Amino acid sequence: MFELATQFNLDLIDWFLISLCGVIIGMSKTGVPGISMIVIPTLAYIFGGKQSTGILLPILIMADFFAVRYYHRHADWKHLLKLLPWALGGVLVAMWTGEQVDDKQFKHLIAITVFASIGLMIWRDRKKEQIIPSTWWFAALMGTAGGFATMIGNAAGPIFSIYLLAMHLPKNKFIGTGAWFYLIINLSKFPLHVGVWKTINWSTLTIDIVTLPVIALGAWLGVKVVKRIPENTYRWFVIIITILSAFLLLI
């Protein structure tokens, strides 16, 4: 612990913020979506932009396992399988462009995409006839954008939330489908961070392991919070949190 503190210049406030990030990630993975977006600027402040993505990814993967363990039976594989190939393609595009464009430009583009998608989704909801987007192009757009966003800044949450909300999935299916999606995508990103971007090593993994107990605490809190939110309220709760999360990408 002391060696890590020396290597990354970590003080007690930094460790407190890292632990708080673990709790927030745990809650976001078990049903409180969007709140994890605050983790991205927090870790970037502590570790720097690109390095923070390598710190955050294993934390997300550990939290993904908690989410899948609890909600695995609720996944809607029909929508998931439509999205995954496009998302994996977006990851590969982001891996290349990550060396060409700075992180700030990426985050601005992602935020604009999120705002446009939210506006479209709310417009559809206000129409009397419920128009579900054509599956191939909508899955392609959201999947590619989500894959790109998750590789650049682990920021696919708002984009993927828009896709599932547009599909009008019930609360538990929304969470279960998201849990499997993030686990698969994040595991696919791991070797790219190790071998290509070199943002994951034994030192960063040690920091991630230290956060495991607080991730578990956050996962438990997330489950408790979701049970208290009615179905209709939950949908608007996700929309509002997603909008706030997109604003964070612009900061």
Image (tube, rainbow, N blue to C red):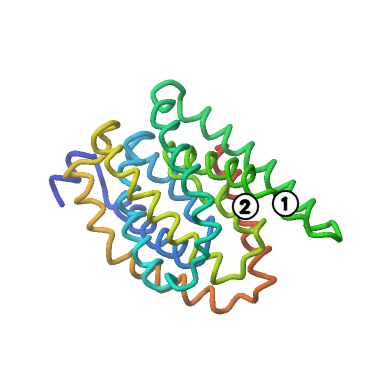
Does label 1 or label 2 sit earlier along the sequence? Answer: 1
Determine the residue located farthest toward the right in the rendered image.
128
Q: Nearer the viewer, residue 247 or 121?
A: 121
Q: Position of residue 162 (x, y in %)?
A: 62, 52
Dot 2 surroundings within 10 Å: few (below 14), some, or many (20 or more)?
Answer: many
- Residue bearing mark 2: 162
**SS at mark 1 in the image:** helix
Residue found at x 46% / y 74%: 223
Q: Amino acid at mark 1?
A: Met
Q: Nearer the viewer, residue 38 or 132?
A: 132
Q: Position of residue 200 (x, y in %)?
A: 25, 41
Picture disc at residue 218: none
Residue found at x 19% / y 51%: 206
Q: Is residue 9 above or below residue 211?
A: above
Q: Position of residue 128 (x, y in %)?
A: 86, 61
Picture disc at residue 121: 1
| Dot 1 and dot 2 residues touching (CB under 8 Å) | yes
Q: Along the horizontal axis of the image, is 231 left or right of 224?
A: right
Residue found at x 47% / y 54%: 36
Q: Along the horizontal axis of the image, is 155 left or right of 43?
A: right
Quarter of the image with the C terminus in it:
top right
Q: Position of residue 190 (x, y in %)?
A: 30, 44
**SS at mark 2 in the image:** helix
Q: Is residue 104 above or below residue 4?
A: above
Determine the residue located farthest toward the top in the rendered image.
100
Distance between the alpha carbons at the discs numbered 1 and 2: 8 Å
Q: Quadrant of residue 231?
A: bottom right
Residue found at x 23% / y 57%: 209
Q: Nearer the viewer, residue 72 or 224?
A: 72
